Image (cartoon, grey):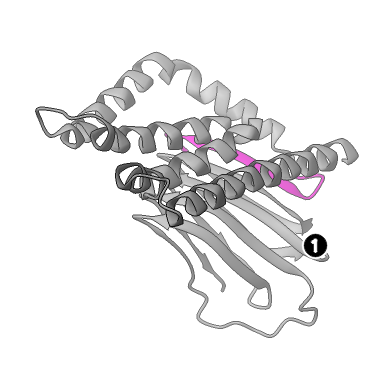
Amino acid sequence: MEKHIEKYSENRRMKKVAFGVIVVAIGALLMASNFGYLPYRLRHIFFSWEMLLIAIGLINVVNRESKTMGLILIGVGTFFLLPDIFVFQFNFVRLFWPVLLIVVGFSLIIFGGRAVNWQRHRRQESSFDSGFINEFNVFGGSKRRIANQVFKGGELNNIFGGSELDMTQAILGEGENLLEVQCIFGGVGMVVPADWNVRIEVVSIFGGFSDKRSYIKKSENDSNVLVIKGTCIFGGGEIKSY
């Protein structure tokens, strides 16, 4: 348990360091822009939603558990940024969906036979004994029911897949409990107790993440909070309660 918590804390620390470096870089670029040292063409590239995807991807690459997700974000951002850097004689963006379908098709052909075993292996590693959850679903999904256990957070990564969590019988850990969510063409569905204090800080691009609980009961301990952070691109998530 201690080893898992230590590794989780180290990943969070590395992500914070990477985020700090990117914030410093953005500040430096903004200063250069305000003083007229950054040409308009470069300013248009650096301050764009495509560059935002690349920045989020770089932060995820630092964390080995989210490396695949980070590389995908960098790839998508770079793809849509290319027309702003190079001049093409055709509509380059129109290649996105055909190329994406081809890549998905080849992935299913090449890795299809091994996907089941790999995903089963990941689920075995995703033991909840320590209170943390860690799942990575690619072209598939997972369902988990957490009962009579303390929930402290973790990571949910879904690429063309989804996660369903039933935590109606779980206990929220003390203090701030961070759940990092990364969804690309995928989603997350969570059922939590009505008295849980939930704070959503998810960046959504062509997607969304919302708290759809029809009834929220006041918590006896407001200091225990579930903080959901991450990125949803062409996907999203929702929180419900019975």
Extreme residue toward the left, this view: 89
Q: Tell me what residue is drawn at x 61 percent, y 40 percent.
A: 135
- Quick check: 34 left or right of 178? left
- Quick check: 37 left or right of 104? right
The percent coordinates of residue 56 (x first, y second) are 52, 44
Q: Tell me what residue is drawn at x 48 percent, y 30 percent.
A: 71
154 in magenta: no
Helix, strand or loop at mark 1: loop
Residue receiving disc 1: 173
163 and 74: which is toward the camera: 74
Q: Tell me what residue is drawn at x 57 percent, y 66 percent.
A: 200
User: What's drawn in magenta, residue-wise?
Assistant: 128-140
55 and 221: which is toward the camera: 55
129 in magenta: yes
Residue 167 in view, yes or no: no
Disc 1 marks which amino acid?
Answer: Gly
Q: Quadrant of the C terminus?
A: bottom right
Q: Tell me what residue is drawn at x 61 percent, y 48 percent.
A: 24
The percent coordinates of residue 142 (x first, y second) are 53, 43
The percent coordinates of residue 26 (x first, y second) are 53, 49
The vertical placement of 120 against 43, above or below, is above
The percent coordinates of residue 1 (x first, y second) are 87, 40
- Quick check: 102 left or right of 167? left
Rendered image quadrant of residue 2: top right
Q: Residues within 10 Å of mark 1 (few under 14, many from 20)?
A: some
The vertical placement of 18 against 95, above or below, is below
Rendered image quadrant of residue 130: top right
53 and 65: which is toward the camera: 53
